[in-house]
Amino acid sequence: MASSYGSFRSRFVPNVSAAAHSGSHLIAPVLTNNTITGNVHILHNAPGFTFDRPHSAQSLDTRSLIFKHKTRICSDYQYVTEYNSLPGEQVLLSERFTQPLILQRHRDQQEREEELRSSGENFQQVLNSRDSNGSSHLNSLFNPDNHGISPSAVILQGNSGNGKTLAVQKIMLDWASGDIYKERFDIVFHLKCKEINRISGRKSLVEILSYSCSLTSDQISQILQRSPEKVLFIIDGFDELKLTRDIYYMPPHTDVIQKASPEVTLCALLKGHIMPESFLLVTSRSTATDILSKLLKGPQRFSEIMGFSEKGVEEYFQKFFQDEELFRRAFTFVKTNENLFTTCSIPVICWIVCTTIKERFKIGMDVTSGLETTTSIYIDFVSTLLEHHCQGQSQSVPSLLISLGQLAERGILEKQVLLDERTVYETISDPVGNPFLCKFLFKRRISQETVFSFMHLSFQEFFTALYYVILDKEESKRKLAQLISFQHNEWLEHPPCCAAVVQFAFGLLNKGVRHTLRKSLCLFVHPNTQALLKEWILKELQRDICYNRTLFILHCLYELHEEDYVTKAMKSWNRINAYSAIFRRTDCWALLYCSQFCQCLQELDLFGCYLTSEKLMMILPALPKFKKLTLPLVDPSVSDLVELMCALTRGQTLNSEDVHVLLHNEGCFFQLSINEEVSRICLKTPWFVDHAEPLESLSLTFPCSDLNNTNWTQLFQIIHQNDSDALMNAILRSFSNLKKLEIEANCLGQRWCVCTLQIIQNCSSLTEVKVNACFLLEEGIKILQRAHIRPACVIRVYGDCELSCNQKVMICLSSRGFSTENLRKSLF
């Protein structure tokens, strides 16, 4: 087959007719099809002339055309028209584009499953591990590989909404601006498959190119003949190209001006029949990559856009808000919500979240008020993809979503995220054109296996829930009843696989979400479906709920986001027990939301959940709602503990009820009890071992009125400093109305006896002191025997007495004197 370059040369060489007078010279750059008369001396390879880079006016004209092309690109590509842009409204590309995570390798089945199943911090860790193994930049797509070979064609694969088109726009703008590929490519053309589908009739390559740029067909022809090896064609959205069987039976098509149907002409370019020396960059969804690879000339390189890493999400937020304070508020909120933060790795969802938050800022509302549920974000994403990435689907939207739901349900029930090809084609009429599915090829010994998946397990769970709630009345009721029964029976130590499906189902019952379903997707949720799920939750609240089910129910109520119903549910829930559960930041949001719809709850038990400072601050506004609290804190700072104490002591529900706060950190136990008249602080810690007589615990009882005057900062600073002497001095200063003092120590000697007597002397309100010690040393007992204390105060000391052969005794010291009582006979 003749090369297209040779064909191009013969086709585009002009006919030259020249006549020379005797003694004159004629220089012609083209030596074919010439008619020359006269006494002419022909110079082959005349200086200043080569075929590829002609000198003089033609070269200058070509450079002028390329400059014109670049200028137009710089003008058109510097702006982005967003999905919600009004007519004439645009934003700068620099305010939106963020370098995505790009991998230039295939991942195996284990890696794919890990990416699909992980969420929250685990998901970011997975992305970071991929990034650390070699993420590529847009300017390195054509770099030589380890063998020094550069690709002629690069496949840039990515899921719907992952930023393929924006990446192409960035490449075009940066090339035209001279920032990338300046020396590598003289000219870059951008072809959009979606637009090629709208071109009718038979067209040549130069004609198709003229539709996408400011140059005419003749001008493009002139540029292409200059240096075809320095031409890059970017073909965006191959998966959207409407291919016919003609591409497999087309005759040789090697000329840039040869006409054929647009898809045949484009495939000739992809195969290298036209312009074989040129370079190609083709974007596609994974569902069409295998077809593309078979059409594409070589050598090929595979690249995949995975979306944003954690750093990428942060950079996108910063560019979007263009204000440090707003950026920090928005990003901090999203980062504390694992579900939202996971989905923000998808650029389109990142845009949806940022847009929603920005609207909240504009009208002065709290950042969280516009991002009510994870379900609402998924609905917005699905609506966006259906409107902008799903053209040409033969199915109606309801039919498409039902088929997706059937496929998703099958995977959920079989606990599979990778779905076999046969099952997919039996359920989905056009998997290749479906924007919600991904397609992978895995090596199986001497062959390949094709599998499909949803973009993430969470989308599989979402579509299952959507399928259940939009079925007809009876079928929906049957499916949901089975789901509820299944998740109840399967719930052992961990939430069952369908827990997230139930949570999404509740989210789809939300009034605003149901309105969007009707308006945008023509879907209707039957009232009976709503009643079934709501009644089930109320019955669940009557049970003795285990820790994982507690978090599950909180999230169901959070996703529902219906104030009247949540208020009703919280009235029947006395004790929230999340004992030893993995308490995520998302759980904090759910707890905070639900607690605002109740006046008072009996108990919140988070023992074993290990709250970080960040999580403590998130749930802090909810804590005064509970009569009893168990809070295990991980490395709390002094300021964390002070804020906690201040929040509890100013809580409105604490005036008449008993409240316990337990803080566990490396063996430390802090308890605060408050009732109508008196408060009690108990501190038990291994920290105070700075003396031969270590302090094990300390308990203080004082009037409630002293709570507001307590110097919590000083108290917790001393605890962190491991200074028991300073602690005793702080007690005298902070609790001037101290009523009762209880001390537990390993042994009672001179130090604690002297300290106790000093406190009694300086604190006139103190009426009772109780000391428990393992051993009562002789030196301490002799001090107590000689001591005199004021009336209305009594010291009782319990322990094994050194003077009484280690008998268990009680020593009582009052204004009446010193007395000893044996409580247990000596063991020896």
Image (cartoon, rainbow, N blue to C red):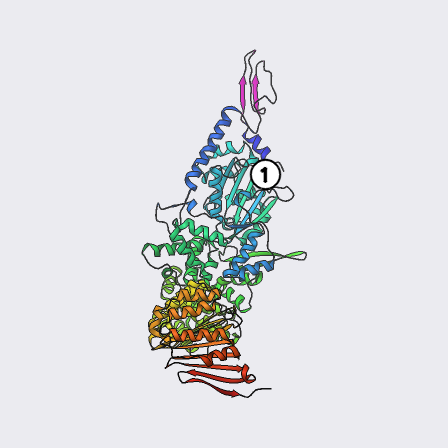
Image coordinates for residue 574, horizontal then vertical, percent? 40, 77
Q: Using the image as rendered, state which of residue 440 and residue 817 is in the foreground.
A: 817
Determine whether, in the image, residue 469 is placed left or right of residue 360.
Answer: right
Q: What residue sits right under mark 1 in the picture?
A: 276
Residue 599 visible at all: no
Q: Nearer the viewer, residue 480 or 590?
A: 590
Q: Residue 573 is drawn in which quadrant?
A: bottom left
The amino acid sitting under disc 1 is: Pro
Are there few (<14), some (14-19), or many (20+) residues within 10 Å of tag 1? Answer: many
Q: Which stretch appears magenta?
A: 14-39
Q: Residue at x 62, y 36 (%)?
A: 2
| Quarter placement of the N terminus | top right
Foreground of the two, 246 or 310: 310
Q: Which residue extends farthest left? A: 363
Secondary structure at numbered mark 1 = loop
Where residue 594 sits, quadrant-wise, is: bottom left
Percent across and percent down for residue 755 are 45, 73
In the current view of this chain or complex, which residue is farthest to the top?
Answer: 22
Find residue 25 and report its horizontal and vertical position in percent: 56, 15
Q: Is residue 484 above or below residue 76?
A: below
